[in-house]
Amino acid sequence: MNYRAIVLGLALSQGTALQVWAAETAPTPAAQDSNMVSYGQEFFSKYDVTTAEDILRRIPGVAAILDSVASQQQERGFGSGGDQILIDGKRMAGKNQILATLRRLQIENISSIQLIRGTSAELDVQSQGLLVNILLKEGAGTGAGSWQLDTRFNNKGYLQPDGLVNYSDSWGRLDYIIGLERNLLPPRNLVGNDWHDRTRYEVYYFPSGAVQELRPQVINREHDKFILTANLTYNVENGDRARFNVLLEPRQPIESDVTALTRFNSSGTQTLTATDVHKRTSGWVNRWELGGDYEAIIGPGTLSTLYIFNYVDNPTNEYRNRIIGTTLNEISRQLTNQLTTEGILRSSYTWPLAAKQTLEVGAEGARNTLTQDLRVFFDLDANGRVEEIPIPTAHAFVQELRGEAFVDHNWKILSNLSLESTLNFEYSQITNNYPFSPTATYKFLKPRADMRYDLSTSDQVRLKVERTVSQLQFNNFVPTFDVVDNEIDAGNPALAPEKTWVYEAAYQHRLPNRQGVLDARVFYKDVSDHIDKFVIRREANGDPVSATGNIGKAKVYGGEAKVGVKLGFLGFPDMGIDVRYLHQWSEATDPFTGRKRHAQNLWTDELDASFRHDVTAWGFSYGTTFKMSEGQQVFSDARVLRTFERGPRLEAFMEKSLPYKLTLRVEGYGLMPHHNREYQQRILYVNDAGNGIISRTERFTEIRDRRFVVSLRGRF
C-alpha cells in the first residue's frame, strides 16, 4: 500500500512545479481551443516511429487508453462511453479493429493527433472521457509499408516465431491500408488469460482442516491466430466519404493440464494416487467482422451511416481422463459447437439548430444471435465408461432484435460552459427455443446530461447523469457443463439487462504546452436487475439449481485519479509517467445466504503505473508498466463461495533504432520476482450454501510464466 501512495502522492504533489516549469521553459504552441491539444509533425519528427500506435504511446495520458482498449467490456450497440479513439473525427465501424488498425496505420499518413476533452458537434461520437482524434493527410495513401518479425519465448522452454506486414497507398480516390499478421501473444489485457504456461499448487481440506487431496497441476496453452485486416476509404468527388473495414481472424487455441492427484481419508491415510489429464481443443475458430460507414453532406447538415457484422464460429471439444496405475479411465467428455453473430446499422443526421447549438437525430437497429449444440458424457457410475447426459435444450437458440431512436443536443451556453443532453428510447425483443419460454419484450428510456465548465483554459469540471443498459451475454441463456464440479449449469432464458443510473463529477487540469494532464473523478452507480448467480429452481429433494439471473439492486461508488506527465521539470523532457489509481466500493445481497457482499468481478483497488524514456539522441527507448489489483473478487453459487486475489504484474521493454529504417525491440511480461501469482479459495457447502455446513475447502496458488519477445521491425 505504501509504494502506491508514494507514487500517486509524488505525481500529484508535483502539479504546481510542473505547471511553473512548463510555462517557463516549453515553447509556446500555436493558438488552439482550450479543450483541444494538438500534436503535429514537429512532435512526430523527434522520434523514429513507424505506426500510429508508436506515436500515441509517447503522448501523456494516451498509453493507458491503448492498454485498456482490448479489455473493455463489449458496449451495447456501437456504444459511446469512456475514452475513445477516432480517425478523422469518426469512430471505426467495428468493435475489434481499433488496435489492429493503429498498428497498421503508417506515421507517413498522419497529419496530426488531437486530444479533445468533452464532446464536439463536429465529431461523430459522444464520449464521457477523452477523445483521441487521428487526422490523416489528404490522399492518405503514400505507398508506405512496414514489417515485423518476432521471436516469442518463456522460462518454460516455449519458443515460436510470428510477425506481420502492412502496406498503405492510394489508387485514384481510394485510400487503403492492408495487413497480414500471425500472432501467438496471449490476450494479455484480458484478466486470467495472459499466459502460455502456468503451475498451480492446489490443496483440498476436510472441514476439520485435515488435507483431503493434494493436486499439483501443470497447465499449457497454445494461442495461435492469423489476422487479416483491410481499411478502405473512397473520397467521392462531391466531398462525401465512404469507408469499409474487414477483419478475418481464424485462430486455434489448445489448452491442456495434468494433475498429480493424491487423496487421503479424514484420518490422514492415503487412499488414491492418480493422474488427471484434461485437454481442450477448439479446432479452427472462424471469426470475422465487416464494417463500414458513409458520410454525405445534405442540406445544412451531415448524414452518417455506420454498420458492422460480427461472426464467430467456435467448435470446442473437452476430454478428461484419469490414469490409475496403468489403467486409463475416461471421466467426462464435452462437445460444444457455438455460433454467435451481431449485426448493427446506425444512421443519424446532424445540423446546426441555432447559434452555438447543434442537433443530431437518428436510429440504430441490431440483431444478435447465439446457436449452441451441446453434448456431455459423464461417468455416472464410476465404471470407467462415460454415458451421455440428457440436457434440456441441448440445441439452443437465442436472438435479440433491438431498435433505438435517439436525439442528441449540443449547446455552447457560454464561452466556458457547454451542455450535451441525449435522450434514447430502446425497444428490445428476445426470443429463444426453450419450451414454455415466452418472448421477452423490453422498453428503456436512456437519458443523459453532460455539463462541462471551464474554470480556465487549463481547468475544467464536469457533471454527468446517465442511465445505461447492459449488453446481455447470451452464454448465460444456454446450458453449460462445469468441468470443475462435474455438473450441468442451467441457462436462464428469462435473463434481463442490468439498468444503471450513473452519477459522476470530474475535474481536469492540463499543464501548459502539452506537458501533461491531471484527472480526478468520483462516481456513484445505482444498479437495478443486477446480474449474478441465483437459485433458478430446486430439485425434488430440495437441492438448489443455480443459473445466472437478475438478483435485484446493487451499488458501486468510488473515485479515480489519473496523472500523465512529461518529466521535463527534472531535466528529462522525453521522459514521462502515466499513473491511474481507482478505489471503489460495491454492495449486493447474496441470493444464497441473504448477506451483504461485494458485487462480483470488481476489485477494491486498481493501480496502473507506466514509465517511458525516449533517449532521442541515441534513438533508444525503454520503459516499464506496473499493474496491481487489491481486494478480493467474490463469486457465490448454490453450493460454493469463491474468493479470488491476484498479485502485481510488471512488464518492461527496450527499443533501439538501427540503420536502414530498422528497429530492434525486446519486451518482457510477468517480471515480478515471484512471477505472476494468483490465489483462490473455494468453500463447498453440503447441498446448499444457505445452511452453512461446509463439505470441503479448496485453496490454490498459481504461478504464471515469464514471457519475452524479441522483434525486428522495418519500413519500406
Image (cartoon, rainbow, N blue to C red):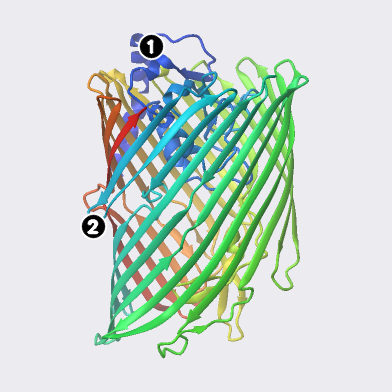
Q: Closest to the observer: 673 or 370?
A: 370
Residue reaching furthest right?
A: 299
Q: Which residue is mark 2?
A: 156
Determine the residue positioned at 64% across, 39% down.
Answer: 466
Q: Amino acid at mark 1?
A: Ala
Q: Quadrant of residue 163?
A: top left
Q: Which residue is mark 1?
A: 23
Q: Is residue 463 visible?
A: yes
Residue reaching furthest front?
A: 171
Determine the secondary structure under disc 2: loop
How far across and down, in percent of the image, does residue 509 sit?
46, 23
Mark 2 closeness class: few <14, some 14–19, many ≥20 residues within 10 Å: few
Which of label 2 and label 1 is nearer to you? 2
Q: CA distance from mark 2 to mark 1?
A: 51 Å
Q: Give the answer, above or below, for where 86 lies relative to 261.
A: above
Horizontally, is 157 left or right of 92 in the view?
left
Horizontally, is 355 left or right of 579 in the view?
right
How far across and down, in percent of the image, does residue 432 sit?
70, 65
Determine the residue positioned at 70% across, 17% down.
Answer: 356
Q: Which mark is residue 572?
A: none
How far across and down, in percent of the image, does residue 605 sit?
40, 46
Which is more N-terminal, label 1 or label 2? 1
How far across and down, in percent of the image, does residue 372 sit?
59, 66
